[in-house]
Amino acid sequence: MGLDVWLLLGAGVVIAAIIAVRVAHRSGLPSLLIFLGIGLLLGESGFGLQFENPVLAQQMGLIALAVILAEGGLTTNWNHVKRSIPTALVLATVGVGVSIAAVAASVHALLGMEWQTALLLGAVLASTDAAAVFSVLRRLPLPTRLAGILEAESGFNDAPTVIAVVLLSAATSPSLGEALLMVVVELAVGAVVGLGVGPLGVYALRRIALPVSGLYPIAVLALAFVAYAGAALLHGSGFLAVYLATLVMGNSRMPHRASSRGFAEGVAWLAQIGLFVMLGMLASPSEMPSAIIPGLVAGLILVAVARPLSIMISALIVRTAQIDRLNWREQAFLSWAGLRGAVPIVLATIPWATNSVHNGTAKLVFNEVFVIVVVYTLVQGPTLPFVAKALGLSTLDEARDLEVESAPLEELNADLLQIRVPPTSKLQGVEIFELRLPTDAQVTLIVRDGRTFVPSDSTRIRIDDQLLIVTTATCRDTVERRMKAISRRGKLAGWFGELGS
């Protein structure tokens, strides 16, 4: 086929995927499944486009994951995740190790897998998927701390998981001590590179006046790949470097920060579409039947045993170290919210591409992982809102960021927050002046029954109102705490010792 035909086909796939996102959003079906379906439709069992190159799939997949992590870092609010970082790091290290061991031991005992294959399968399945977590959880009204743990965990756990899969896929596996040392060194190098590139990038962007505003988002994405490639060249973790670098840049006062985030979000969506379609084309539906039973068994072990066990042990560690305290409801939700997506499928191409195990065995692992991702994403993703509500973890009154494209707020060093008043909130009946917000914050608009109006000091807040609050960056935390306090205890929250933390 000629270039024009390929361009037309590629554009058609992207447009179909964009329409699919809309359908998925309305139906609650995870969009990644639709993208995989498009890939299967284009592949050997559909239109017959042949794609059987695991090496290329691995390379393109790792690049796409780096883009997705960059978008995740840029759009993660540091104020929301900073308290969750220690817990997330334990989940991303100790939790990953526990998950690998639990899955490997279980599939070795139940399915009779060889230890090398069992450990590979456990390592491939150990990482939660950043794209799935960011896209699903940011629409859920979760407590800030809990959402922060899941977001930070998905950003951090790719790095140790990739290292584990590469080590297990090597022709000669190192000893346990050597492997742990290599993991520590690679993570340390990745962290140093990421925390170096991020601040330097912010410093440069603040002082170099680019002639066109559209160059700033491109520069930010280029800096993300500087961190990724730089860490890789130094034998460090590129994934950890790119996430930390973009986390720093996304939470600094850069020029055109909002447009940089919007650009990164668009590129990340394109990366997700291309990644899932490619992985769908790489899969062979004719080979899937033999992988269904072992895949379902391994997935059940992951969801019902390995993930909860990793959460319980990590929770015990953070409680013993007095880092954090996770109650049983939070542990239950964290166990169910360990979403898998593109990351396990991409990681499954590594042993396939390196031929570290028998090619048929490597392809079987890929097929099993494909089945696990499809089935359990279909089960877990749509049920998360119901699980959160059943566990009493939904918080409709949490403040959410609103990005304003024209971004005059950015120049004023200000933020725009949106707060919805849920039925159980004690904000009901409180007058605007009784909120006693800082002088640098103001309720500018209220959306009530589909009508928008500017409130006066005596306007009473009602259930289901949506409040838009403009606040300077310096007093944003104070505003959020004050609104939480009043929502919990009413306008006299201060007298009851409620600080909204």
Image (cartoon, rainbow, N blue to C red):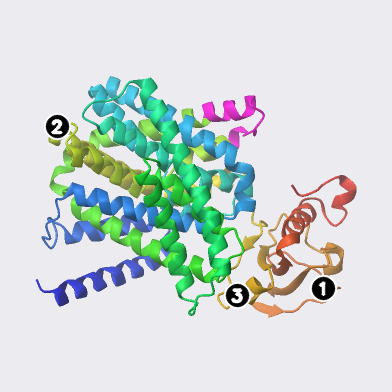
Residue 416, given in percent of the width and then of the height, sits at 66, 68
N-term mark: 3 or 2: 2
- Residue 381 to residue 355: above or below: below
Kind of residue indicated by mark 1: Thr
User: Does the magenta segment cover residue 472?
Assistant: no
- Residue 465 to residue 494: above or below: below
Residues in magenta, as a range: 312-329
Is 106 situated left or right of 90 in this image? left
User: Viewer-nearest of labels 2 and 1?
Assistant: 2
Q: Are marks 1 and 3 in contact (CB under 8 Å)?
A: no
Q: Are marks 2 and 1 in contact (CB under 8 Å)?
A: no
Residue 224, given in percent of the width and then of the height, sits at 44, 57
In which quarter of the view is residue 431 placed? bottom right
Looking at the picture, tell me which residue is in the foreground, 234 or 68. Answer: 234
Residue assigned mark 1: 459
Looking at the picture, tell me which residue is in the foreground, 198 or 339. Answer: 198
In which quarter of the view is residue 1 placed? bottom left
* Residue 257 marker: none
N-term mark: 1 or 3: 3
Kind of residue indicated by mark 2: His
Kind of residue indicated by mark 3: Ala
User: Does the magenta segment cover residue 321?
Assistant: yes
Residue assigned mark 3: 407
Residue assigned mark 2: 358
